[in-house]
Amino acid sequence: MAQNGNQKKGGSFLEKLVALTRKQFFIPIAALTILVLFNLIMDPSFFAITLGTNSNGDPVLSGYLITILNNASELVILAIGMTLVTSASGGQDISVGSAIAIAGSVMLRILVGGPVNPGKIILAFLVACVVAMIFGAFNGVLVAYFKIQPMVATLILFTAGRSIAAWINNNELPIISEPLFGYFGNFIPGVALPTPVFIAIICVIIIMLVLKFTTLGLYTQAVGINPSSSRLNGIDPAKVKLITYIILGLCVAIAGFIKVSRFSTINYSVIAKDIEMDAILAVALGGNSLGGGKFNMASSIMGAYIIQFLTTTLFKFNVVSTALPAYKAVVVIVLVVLSAPVVREKLDSFWKKLSTKKSVKEAA
Amino acid sequence: MKKFLALLVAASMGFAMCACAAESSNEGGLIKVGIINNDPNESGYRTANDADMKAMFTEENGYDASFFYSLKNEEQIAAAQQFVQDEVDYLLISAAGTSGWDSVLTDAQNAGIQVILFDRTIDADASLYAASIVSDMAQEGETAVSWLASQNLAEYNVIHIQGVMGSSAQIGRSGALDEMVAANDNWNLVTQQTAEWNAETAQQIVQAVIDSGESFNVVYAENDDMARGAVAALDAANISHGVGGDVIIMSFDCNQWALEELLAGNWNYDGQCNPFQASYINDIIQGLEAGNAPAEQVVVMVEQGFSADTITQADVDSFGI
Amino acid sequence: MENNVLLQLNGICKYFPGVRALQNVDFTLRSGEIHALMGENGAGKSTLIKVLTGVYTKDGGNVRIEGNEATIKSPQDAQNVGISTVYQEIALCPNLTVAENMFIGRGKGKFTDWKMMNARTTELLTSLDIPATATQQLGSCSIAVQQMVAIARAVDMECKVLILDEPTSSLDESEVAKLFKLMRDLKAKGVGIIFVTHFLDQVYEVCDRITVLRDGKLVGEYVIQDLPRVQLVSKMLGKEFDEMSDIKTVDPEAKDIKVGTPVIECTGLQSDAGIKPFDFKIWKGEVNGFTGLLGSGRSECVRSIFGADRVIAGEVKIDGKPVKIKKPLDAMKAGIGYLPEDRKLDGIVADLSVKDNIILAYQVMKGWGHPISKTKAEEIAQKYIKLLDIKTASSETPIGQLSGGNQQKCILARWLLTDPKYLILDEPTRGIDIGTKVEIQKLALKLAKEEGKSVTFISSELDEMIRTCSRLVVMRDRKVVGELNESELTQSKIMETIAGGEG
């Protein structure tokens, strides 16, 4: 989405408002504001945070905000990779949920049987990373080199992934009883914030550093906007696309790690179910074009937190959880319609008419 | 893709069965069964069910068994058709859907094949199958709710976490509780939400109740995964549960690990949903082979509820799935 | 008025916002005639055809078919009055059969009579001598045959006027011959054919008349025998052939340039874009150019040097040392810069800022792990914005919002930043205002003279080429057909070489 840096200064309030709506940050901020206001009006205690202890006697923070931060973690991590994939390939990876099942299954396969120690957890995590990155590369090759539409290419893994995950553990549902393994999805004793919050923050910091200290951001955007021109500037568009899918694979492994650690087990058919839609929605909520090109990572991350905010709000007000997707669908429709060029043009001309009318009035 | 794979599997199975047929007629003595089941990945229940069937229908026990798995009704029907063509002696079906089975079952009947339904029922004329072995989900729910009533609490503030809405397990297990809540003033539902068998959604539902500060003393989860999710939320908020705790944890399915939670006193109740149907089927087949029709066409399996007060290690070992 | 006139256009006008695409254009097509429609870029050929086929609605003038005024407001109208078009990209369905393609979208009734369709198709294919069968999948035919099927379909729709828009650009010689035979057959049957092409040889081989357009205006209609090639070229380019007086003053110093080892030396270079192998040399401090009509292969030549198309034969030496250039990055690292012909498609990255567009190539050469810091990038951007006088609100403005000329300056800045020893400027002045054009020409000369760079300059405008280049490689029909040195650089000589043939 184009940022309008060259808006005329000193325009009317309306003009300024219009300029504001064209900024990329507008969509997530507006969505967040609406949610916050809604909760403030309905029940201000929504924002209360209390320090208590958990059943092990360790201090933990609790409250809706903590719940949001905690449960959004996997989504935030996925949104990072999904943003890059969307930017470079102009499409989305719909297999991330299935891939999480695979990554989680791999981890449990290594951990099950025998004692669990930190070294083994690290090993399991690393192997899961490698496996998830290989599956990411598989998607990436289909998209970048075979030029298959991303949604179609990733449909393969979307369909087969959960069966593969089940096959890895011979259809068994292993449970890791070692409490250490549960720390990553819950609390580290003595730390009051849930661990996933930290993992998500670390991922965010890492991606921000990567974007700062490498040319990844420039390359993915250039490839997404104009592959032909990128090639003539020495970029290998296929390679860049492939890399974004591999990075998403890494994000999948980390998210999968948190997911299996939350309950120290896995359920192949429901783990991370429908998370791909939330991840894509996070990118869209961040004001990024799902058609690829320019992206704003911070916006996507905020989008992910907003989705969890919405989910938790709906839970609070006892909305039936099967109805959640319907609410999200409404959000998607509004976003997509608002960002469609036709509507944008109409809106623009509408604003223009309004402001000219107003200025005519002022002149009179 | 999946469909294609399934077809491939079905086709290759067809070949394999042809080969088997040739063999078995030479060897003689083996009873040929075609088993159509749901995908064992679907749940721990299904995995246990499949393992139980596989353990029972072996050559040692006098069976020549072929298996077909699908969660799709039409694929299952196609496989049944194939089994009929391959002239199996018995067709064992756990149907994915209830309708559309009439014609293939008629074909089976004309070919002299006995049909035994297990776990799921179908909408077909009762004359088309020899027996149906089922769990009574409503009974499961009633057993559980009456156990809960016997706890004689002054007030029941229940968090009710439901399975996938409309599934027979959900309908049966929710029904008894709904009736009880409607009939008694001291029974309240704090929240009633579906977590679609998903631990994480269950955790979020319970978390939302905890964050809202509403009080509750019972979590009624319709399967073990969801109970696990609910307990995770309670643990994080230091709400005691299980034997002697503030909140009673109730669940269904009797996974081995769930029964261990019961044994440790962390949970209070787990209702069995018996996946071990193979022995019932075996009894019926043996009876039919001996010329005796089954005493009852619909066989309801014995299913019990386990309470933390009475469960033993032996129960965990023999009933855990 | 002649009595065999099929189609008569009078005073056709078409305006787009800010552009007069067609002004008062007349055109006449007689039955049994193949009529070439010629013109360079922006001459209005495609606009005229789109008006004729109902894609655009004309803003003035009238169209008569066999003397009756016709209103064409949609492609369907055009079909109804007997005008059919076969485009360069075949607009049929490759996964349907030939017969299905012949009848698709034409059925008036609700039922499909397969037998009738196949029989009619076979009959038609035989009568037109097209080597295909009715039940064959269209995609399995060669492009030429697909092209012919498209024509047969048009013929079967009882078209009187057949428009062929660049039908030969993806055909080989034998296929072209077949297509021409078909065209002549149709001509004998009284169909009027409008033939749009870039290939001069083909025009002279098959056409009866030529209409030339330039800048949206009619230049004239000519019987082919009356218009020698040189005249045609001069009419298309808008330079009177007699304007030969503008002999360039020869710079005595210039002769010293072509000594020693060339900076770039290509031998037998050939790419998969369809150009014939060519040789090319350029020395330090030299500005030379490729010239030829649109589609003659000028861009393809420079693209192969830069590795933009896949090179399939030949070798390149830089400063006498052989180098392997497989992809643009290889060329960039070897010190070559390339400002592409299509600014929108290959040049700018529209949504990225002016700053990012300027640093892009330099950044890629530095590699993944060495991003240019924000302050450094800003510094660079400001330097070039000032140096080239790029008019932009800020360095953060998306380049897509700039005018064409300023976009082009940004791309120039991008390549100047990489400090190449050899810079290729492919149509750097197309579609930009006069002032900027001159600036860019001057810049090219300055780079060569003051900084000793070698520059290849390509432009459709001959006088621009003459002003800037000291040597021209002339191309026709994807072949290098000559090289003109300083003293030979006159418009007439260039046009003669471009036209070739009997001149």
Image: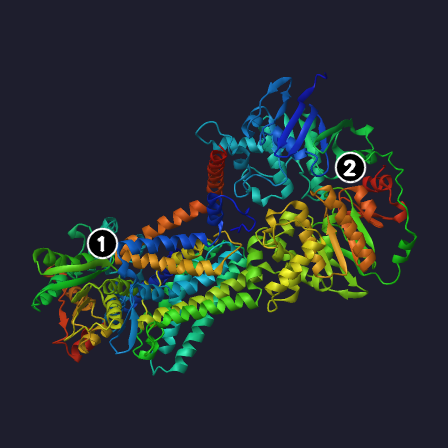
Mark 2 surroundings: few (<14), some (14-19) or many (≥20) residues within 10 A: many
Residue C426 seen in the figure: yes
Mark 2: which amino acid? Leu
Relative to C239, residue B14 above or below:
below
How is the model colour-coded? rainbow
Count of numbered circles in the view: 2
Mark 1, other Cα within 10 Å: few <14 / some 14–19 / many ≥20: few
Secondary-structure class at tag 2: helix
Q: Which of the pair A228/A42 is nearer the observer?
A: A42
Checking the image for residue C424, the label placed there is none
Q: Pointer 1 indicates a residue of which chain?
A: B
Query: In the image, what residue type sits under mark 1?
Result: Gly
- Nearest the camera: C391 or C139? C391
Q: Position of residue C420 (x, y in %)?
A: 74, 61
Mark 2 to mark 1 CA distance (whole Å): 76 Å
> Callout 1: helix, strand or loop?
loop
> Are labels 2 and 1 on one chain?
no
Is residue A104 something one can see in this rendering?
no
Q: Which residue is mark 1?
A: B166
Residue C483: x and y in percent read 85, 49
B124 or A149, nearer to the observer: A149
Q: List the residue tagged with mark 2.
A: C237
The image shows residue C301 at horizontal and vertical percentages of 74, 52
Q: Chain of mark 2?
A: C
Could you tell me which residue is drawn at 36 percent across and 65 percent down? A69
Q: Quadrant of residue C357?
A: bottom right
Front-lying residue, C344 or B53: C344
